[in-house]
Image: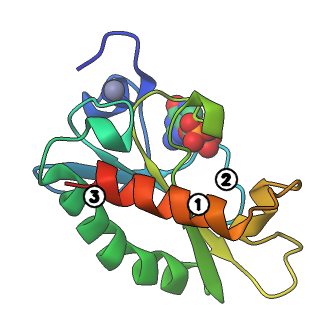
Amino acid sequence: MADDCIFCKIIAGEIPSRTVYEDDNVLAFLDVNPLTKGHTLVIPKAHHQTIADLPAGLGEAVFEALYHLTPAVEQAVSADGSNIGVNNGTAAGQEVQHVHAHIVPRFEGDGGGAVHSIIRTMPELTDEEFDDIAAGIRAATD
Ligand code: 5GP
Ligand code: ZN
């Protein structure tokens, strides 16, 4: 547990939350400032800042919870779909430094955008740049 972490305090029961799911590794609860009805946060119980910091197995546990919870959240609020996202690192807009996935239910005509709406100015890449990026990612994956 990190002393100054709001989500660790929620896990410890020091700050109340509307829990919707809990197991040994994962907790899910309603976002206090929902983007849409049913906006849910899924977090590992252990404090880690970003996805890269998660130990082996814990990322899978979070994704497994997302897998089971997403249809349940959608059904509970009669959503037509959902966006699932992680603001991974402060450069990506992460405000609470305890890794968490958002399930944001979506409704036909709700006026929201796709994941693609997070960036407005896209890079124009040459074939060589695409190739270099792909090679760099392959080299970093082991
Ligand atoms: P981030 O920008 O870090 O990805 O999102 C943090 C999320 O945590 C925000 O959507 C915010 O509304 C939510 N949040 C912050 N503090 C609390 C809290 O005390 N309780 C709950 N339930 N959600 C919180
Ligand atoms: Zn924490």
Q: Is mark 1 within 8 Å of ligand 1?
A: yes
* Residue at the spot 82% in from the left edge and 61% down from the top edge: 124
Kindly identify the amino acid type of the residue bearing the numbered disc 3. Answer: Val
Tell me where residue 47 sits by quadrant. Answer: top left
Residue 16 at x, y percent in the picture: 41, 34
The residue where tag 2 is placed is: 34
The residue where tag 3 is placed is: 62
Kindly identify the amino acid type of the residue bearing the numbered disc 2. Answer: Pro
In this picture the colour scheme is: rainbow
Kindly identify the amino acid type of the residue bearing the numbered disc 1. Answer: His
Tell me where residue 81 sits by quadrant. Answer: bottom right
Left or right of 38: which side holds 126? right
Name the image quarter holding the N terminus.
top left
Residue 64 at x, y percent in the picture: 24, 70
Query: Which residue ends up furthest to the front in the rendered image?
Result: 128
Which circle, 1 or 3, is nearer the viewer? 3
Disc 2 crowd rating (10 Å Cα; few below 14, some 14-19, many 20+) is: some
Quarter of the displayed picture in which ligand 1 can be seen: top right
Which is more N-terminal, label 2 or label 1?
2
Which circle, 2 or 3, is nearer the viewer? 3
> How far apart are labels 1 and 2 at the CA level?
5 Å
Which is more N-terminal, label 3 or label 1?
1
Q: Which mark is residue 39?
A: 1
* Residue at the spot 29% in from the left edge and 16% down from the top edge: 2
What number of labels is visible?
3
Q: Is mark 2 within 8 Å of ligand 1?
A: yes
Name the image quarter holding the C terminus.
bottom left
Question: Contact (CB < 8 A) between labels 1 and 2?
Answer: yes
> How far apart are labels 1 and 3 at the CA level?
16 Å
Residue 120 at x, y percent in the picture: 88, 56
